[in-house]
Amino acid sequence: MKLKFFKYQGTGNDFVIVDNRLDFFNKNDTKSIERLCDRRFGIGADGLILLENDKMSDFKMVYFNADGNESSMCGNGGRCLVAFAHYLGIVGDECTFNAIDGLHHATIEGSSVSLKMNDVEEIRETEVYSFLDTGSPHHVQLVSGLDDFDVYNEGKRIRYGLYGESGSNVNFVEQGDANGFLVRTYERGVENETLSCGTGVTAVALAMHNLGKARTNKVDVKTRGGSLSISFDHKNGKYTNISLKGPAVQVFKGELEW
Ligand SMILES: N[C@@H](CCC[C@H](N)C(=O)O)C(=O)O
């Protein structure tokens, strides 16, 4: 059988996307999903996303990390899937879709997609790092010399050492200007640094605001794959109306023997 696929990227976080509205895709075949994401033996991606029918919203997002396992929310993946749904003509310039962490509203302006993220009520702070869940778990740590920082080894050590087998994504941050930050992320499930992580930069923006390092409710974040902007409301220690905005682009499409 031929598998039709599409390749998207959102600030360099890249995904294989498959239209599974006819429900043909075997989601338990971890090895095949891992192989599709393999950069040498497959198409190559940080994750695989299925677009499926949903009774409550415009469509459903099912997300797998590059290791083949279904995982928690992916912010950049969600933005790419919205661009894909728009490309297929399933939705217009705005939509609502269902993901593992619930419903998300999104708007599209040209090649930019703005995605509403879930409210965040709790940020755990220590002297060294913050930890919060923005749909996926994130460790956020300020460092100096981010450009030369050993994201792979430090990220891996923290991911397993502090958070056990279930793990966490690990973000290293350096402040640029008043409301601008530079971020590099070690992603669990990819088990490597990726060029960008949407739930990660969202976590960074909220953690930096909570620490008083970001002074306004709009934070710009530069990743190695591009720039994202995060806006939010903050009241009584709770972050609401969180929005993640940035480019989401189709790179190529194709089919392979499946
Ligand atoms: N790249 C993603 C995060 C994907 C999930 C993550 N790897 C995990 O398993 O927690 C993003 O853009 O948010």
Image (cartoon, rainbow, N blue to C red):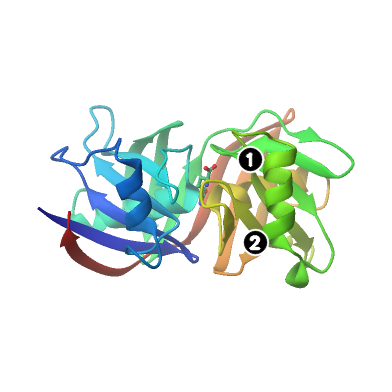
Q: Is residue 234 left or right of residue 34?
A: right
Residue type at mark 1: give it: Ser
Q: Looking at mark 1, is its residue's CB closer than 8 Å to ligand 1?
A: yes
Q: Secondary structure at mark 1?
A: loop
In this rendering, position of residue 76 left or right of residue 61: right
**Mark 1 vs 2, N-terminal side:** 1
**Neighbourhood count class around disc 2 (C-alpha, 10 Å): few under 14, some 14–19, many 20 upward:** many
Q: What is the x, y in percent for residue 77?
A: 42, 51
* Residue 161: percent from left, percent from top: 74, 40
Mark 2 vs ligand 1: CB under 8 Å? no
In this view, which residue lies farthest toward the right? 127
Mark yes or no: residue 148 visible: yes
Q: Residue at x 21, y 36 (%)?
A: 53
Under mark 2, the amino acid is Val
The image quadrant that residue 142 belongs to is bottom right
Q: Residue at x 52, y 46 (%)?
A: 189
Element under label 2? strand
Closest to the observer, 132 or 165: 165
Q: Mark 1 vs mark 2: give the one in front.
A: 1
The residue labelled by disc 2 is: 221
> 118 left or right of 98?
right
Q: Position of residue 181 (x, y in %)?
A: 72, 62
> Distance between the Cα atoms at labels 1 and 2?
20 Å
Q: Which mark is residue 168?
A: 1
